[in-house]
Amino acid sequence: MVDDICISDVLLAGAKEVFETMIFMDLEEASEPDRKIEDDAMLGSITFKIDFEGNMQGCLTICCSTPCAKTIATNMLGMEPDEEISEAEIRDALGEVTNMVMGSVKTRVQDEVGNLQVSIPTVVSGRDLEYSLGDGASKISVIVSLGDEYIADISWLCREAHKLNRKREDKQA
């Protein structure tokens, strides 16, 4: 299985490639990794999630504040920062960003983990959300700074599929 150090490097490289080429925002690993994502007073943070399965099962998530999501969406769509953008447009744009980051990460890990089948991205709004795959799962998070203004959390939550299958077999025995 891919180790934590490798996945954190892959997450950072994959996200950096997408953000710098498609969104025109600098992305670097945060110098203050304990800094919290600034919550919007009304909506809190927004998490964009895409599931995958194959020899490994899990999800990739990107979590950021509402103002950060708006900035990412307006940059991606080539809009001016003060232009009106709907919540639906923000969600669509960030869903596509999540899809592109997953594609970039998938390309980097497929030789080691095999092909991964990827779902359609989903969006969740709220505060302090956590995902779990149960026992035997690993979570790797990279806290990044975007354009020196925002913080985002890019996470990879996974477990090997053969471990999942073995657990199902154990329960049937």
Image (spheres, helix red, strand yellow):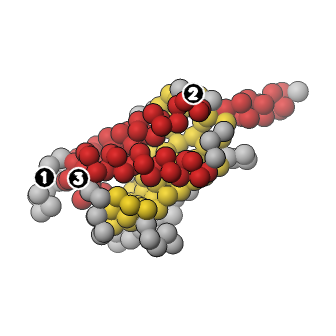
Left or right of residue 137: residue 142: left
The residue at the far right in this view is 173
Residue drawn at the location 46% of the way across and 73% of the way down: 32
Q: Residues within 10 Å of mark 3 (few under 14, many from 20)?
A: some
Q: Using the rendered image of the protein, determine whether residue 124 is visible from the camera's viewpoint.
A: no
Label 1 sits on a secondary structure element that is: loop
Whether 135 is drawn above or below 44: the answer is above
Residue 29 relative to residue 90: left or right: right
Label drawn at residue 114: 2
Give the residue displayed 59% in from the left and 32% down from the top: 113
As measured in the structure, the alpha-carbon distance from the residue carrying label 3 to the one carrying label 1 is: 12 Å
Residue 79 image label: 1
Task: Specify few, some or many for label 1: CA neighbours under 10 Å numbering under 14, 14-19, or 20 or more.
Answer: few
Q: Which numbered disc flags the more N-terminal residue, 3 or 1?
A: 3
Residue kind at label 1, given as amino acid type:
Met
What's the amino acid at mark 2? Gly
